[in-house]
Amino acid sequence: MKRWLFTAFSFTVAILVSVHAVRGSAPDGVSLSLPPLAHALALAAFVVEIISRTLKICWSGKAVGVHIPFWTGVRVCLGGDFGASITPARAGAEPARYLILYESGLRGSPLIIVLYAELFFEMISLVIVASAMLLIFDATRSAAVAVTATMGMYAASIFAVAGVATFLARRNLGDTPAPWATRLHLTGKRWAFIKKWVDRIRDAVTGFRTMHRGWGAASCLVSVVHVAVRFTILPALVLTTTSAVASVPIGPLILWPFSFIYGAAIVPAPAGGGAVELAFRASLGGTIPAATFAAALVWWRFYTFYLYIALGALVAGNTALRAIRDAEEVEEELERSE
């Protein structure tokens, strides 16, 4: 109950901060209207992002010899987005994706490989897209530092997961807890749980190394598409709305959202706790014309965050919530068991 109260509080704060940012940007009156073209382009980018990310899931499955239906891929993407949005630091994303794939019939190491492949190809895509953006568009020092830091932190986390998985894959755990495990009270059900997952990780590491490279490359390619298209939304909203297009630099409109979207994962609060809105105003308040700023902020958050929540709740909300509850129950059981 406390966690759900914290989630509700976080969303309330995010909305209040949005209202404050909107009012502060246009003290003489706020207009949230955008031309139909702006909505059409933003919605098209959203659809392309979902389709390309779904293909990444499906083709990652093909790379390890399993078939993942397209609709299942859609549910995995949107269900993961929903689970991420209502948990601190997006911690609910992977449990939601795991349970959706599990209930679709995928089991064992292929399931783990598909989930890790998504993260691994995402990392490669981020490096490619971020590097290209920094080369193509003019960036202020602060924007370049933010993009580089975000890219570095994401890559470091994925390599850390790979390093831990490789280390564990080289360990053969017996049925009897090792001395170090006994000293840490990792006995009984705790040790059985650890042994089961180490065995799965070992198989997953082997499977990832031997995956079909053609399908893996195809999955990585559509991952580049899904990452890149995310950063077309804000320029579409701003440049089709303001009459002084020539005076609005496109670089900040593309570079800063990179840090907002991927940097939000380090914010220990669901919905970003208002941090995204504050960062948006601080970094882009002087770039986006005042008459357009309010609409740009509200609709950008809608097309990059709230729309994912709404659709995720519709297509896989119950499964995502069950995955989060199951993860909490496992943690509680391990804490109680000896």
Image: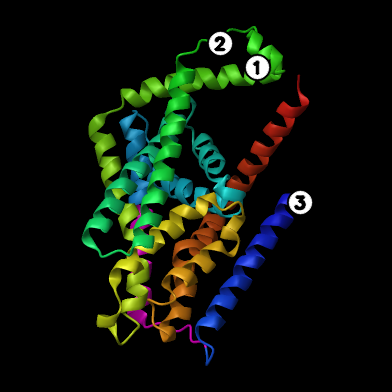
Which comes sooner in the sequence, label 3 or label 2? Answer: 3
Which residue of the protein is positioned furthest toward the bottom in this rendering?
Answer: 28
* Residue 283 seen in this snapshot: yes
Please rate how many residues cluster around mark 2, counting C-alpha atoms within 10 Å: few if below 14, some from 14 to 19, many from 20.
some
Q: Are marks 2 and 1 in contact (CB under 8 Å)?
A: yes
Residue 36 highlighted magenta (yes or no): yes
Give the amino acid at mark 3: Lys
Q: Which residue is mark 3?
A: 2
Which comes sooner in the sequence, label 1 or label 3? Answer: 3
In the displayed structure image, the side of residue 262 where residue 248 appears, left or right: left
Residue 333 in percent (x, y) is at 73, 29
Residue 160 highlighted magenta (yes or no): no
Question: Which residues are the magenta region?
Answer: 30-51
Q: Which quadrant, please, contains the C terminus? A: top right
Give the amino acid at mark 2: Leu
Residue 180 sits in quarter: top right
Residue 89 in percent (x, y) is at 57, 49
Q: Are marks 1 and 3 in contact (CB under 8 Å)?
A: no
Secondary structure found at label 3: helix
In the displayed structure image, the side of residue 198 where residue 53 appears, left or right: left
* Residue 232 seen in this snapshot: no
Q: Which residue is mark 1?
A: 191
Residue 307 in percent (x, y) is at 49, 64
Secondary structure found at label 2: loop
In the image, is residue 90 above or below residue 207? below
Distance from Cα at disc 1 to Cα at disc 3:
29 Å
Please rate how many residues cluster around mark 1, counting C-alpha atoms within 10 Å: few if below 14, some from 14 to 19, many from 20.
many
Q: Are marks 3 and 2 in contact (CB under 8 Å)?
A: no
Which comes sooner in the sequence, label 2 or label 1? Answer: 2
For the stretch drawn in magenta, what is the main secondary structure?
Answer: helix
